[in-house]
Image (tube, helix red, strand yellow):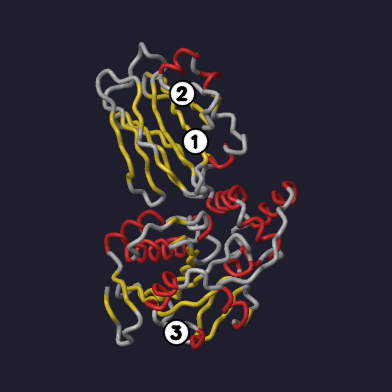
């Protein structure tokens, strides 16, 4: 961390390795620059915080492809980071989505300037939602502009206030937008999926756009339509008892005795959801099993297993099961031994809307299941 000539502001060094890794992963994707910029901002800033943070469901590529800014919860306050590469610090520009959509509104908004040439990130001030609504100017491109004089440049003030005055009023009430009916949403997605439209967020009335961008399913669908990506398994829908045909109930594929032997049978007090998918491995059929459970903090608890067809059969030796992040990092990995009929990753918790992949490798053979929590 570098202290600038203004001692109240900070400058953070951006890791060259992080830049290379993220650019390699996103350079061929739609809106790659915006996705790249927001991930750089988030992954550079979060390590400066001593306390744990909870990432927001909007801090994902399917959101960044259309709206600039990332969000997380820290000390029970919702923090919004808005990165820009302009060197101008006379005003702070915030997309309307972060200000006028109830689900996205934050408590504190941090102004960030990123210098890609010098691999540095400058946090030059912060403000509140209340200040933006009362003072900022609304622009034709659905953004708010706040003059720099209304920003507090000293982040130490934010740290102190969050401890000494955690009940400081920071927000004002904004209208609630009704969900878009399914048929209308499908028509809007078809319209916005046209890649000749540079900014879908400006193509339709804001009330309709707000409903699309805050719905995990519609937002992901729009992202896939504009990128031509294969569909992702939406795990949040499982909690609403909505499943695709490729993921079956345990009992429809595995025998009752087999399911019980692997601890997959439901009990009267079991609130988890378990589904299974058949995988055609080289000279072998195996089953990918996912178990989900809603956590009290709003996240989703996830367990991932790979198993053979029965207890009397084994997985191919050195079969590898991996959990991979949206940026391509291997988060977890486990490999089967000579007589394993099941391998399992450690249970983890994920905020809603986070993208990840499950990968199964047998020698040179690889099968990948793309998911969004």
Judging by the rendered image, the residue that carries numbered circle 1 is 292
- Number of labels in the image equals 3
At numbered mark 1, what does the secondary structure look like: helix, strand or loop? strand
Can you say whether 257 is above or below 42 in the image? Answer: above
Q: Mark 2 highlights which residue?
A: 264
Of label 1 and label 2, which has the lower sequence position? 2
Q: Observer-nearest residue: 11 or 231? A: 11
Picture coordinates of residue 269 (x, y %)?
53, 27
In this picture, is 95 found above or below 279?
below
What x and y, as percent, mark residue 220?
56, 50
Name the residue nearer the viewer: 232 or 82.
Answer: 82
User: Reading the chain from its start, which is encountered first: label 1 or label 3?
Assistant: 3
> Label 1 to label 3, Cα distance in Å?
46 Å
Q: Earlier in the sequence, mark 2 or mark 3?
A: 3
Whole-percent x, y for residue 208 in the image: 70, 60
Toward the left, the furthest residue is 338
């Amino acid at each position: 961390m570098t202290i600038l000539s203004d001692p109240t502001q900070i400058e953070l060094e951006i890791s060259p390795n992080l830049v290379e890794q993220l650019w390699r992963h996103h350079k061929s994707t739609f809106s790659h620059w915006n996705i790249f910029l927001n991930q750089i901002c988030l992954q550079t800033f979060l390590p400066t915080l001593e306390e744990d943070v909870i990432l927001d469901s909007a801090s994902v590529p399917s959101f960044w492809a259309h709206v600039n800014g990332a969000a997380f919860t820290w000390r029970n306050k919702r923090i919004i980071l808005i990165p820009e590469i302009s060197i101008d610090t006379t005003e702070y520009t915030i997309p309307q989505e972060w200000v006028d959509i109830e689900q996205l509104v934050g408590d504190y908004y941090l102004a960030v300037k990123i210098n890609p040439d010098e691999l540095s990130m400058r946090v030059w001030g912060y403000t509140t939602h209340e200040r933006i609504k009362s003072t900022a100017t609304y622009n034709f491109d659905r953004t708010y502009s706040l003059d720099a004089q209304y920003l507090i440049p000293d982040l130490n003030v934010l740290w102190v206030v969050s401890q000494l005055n955690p009940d400081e009023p920071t927000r004002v009430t904004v209208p609630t937008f009704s969900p878009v009916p399914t048929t209308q949403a499908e028509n809007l997605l078809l319209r916005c999926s046209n890649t000749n439209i540079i900014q879908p967020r400006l193509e339709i009335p804001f009330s309709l756009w707000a409903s699309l961008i805050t719905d995990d399913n519609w937002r992901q669908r729009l992202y896939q339509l504009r990128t031509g990506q294969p569909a992702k398994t939406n795990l949040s829908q499982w909690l609403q008892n909505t499943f695709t045909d490729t993921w079956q109930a345990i009992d429809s594929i595995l025998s009752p005795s087999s399911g019980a032997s692997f601890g997959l049978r439901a009990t009267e007090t079991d609130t988890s959801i378990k589904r299974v998918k058949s995988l055609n491995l080289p000279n072998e059929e195996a089953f990918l099993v996912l178990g989900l459970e809603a956590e009290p903090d709003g996240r989703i608890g996830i367990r991932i297993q790979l198993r053979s067809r029965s207890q009397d059969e084994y997985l191919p030796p050195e079969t590898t099961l991996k959990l991979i992040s949206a940026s391509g990092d291997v988060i977890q990995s486990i490999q089967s031994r000579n007589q394993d009929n099941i391998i399992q990753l450690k249970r983890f918790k994920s905020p809603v809307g986070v993208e990840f992949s499950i990968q199964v490798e047998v020698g040179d053979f690889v099968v990948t299941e793309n998911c969004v929590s």
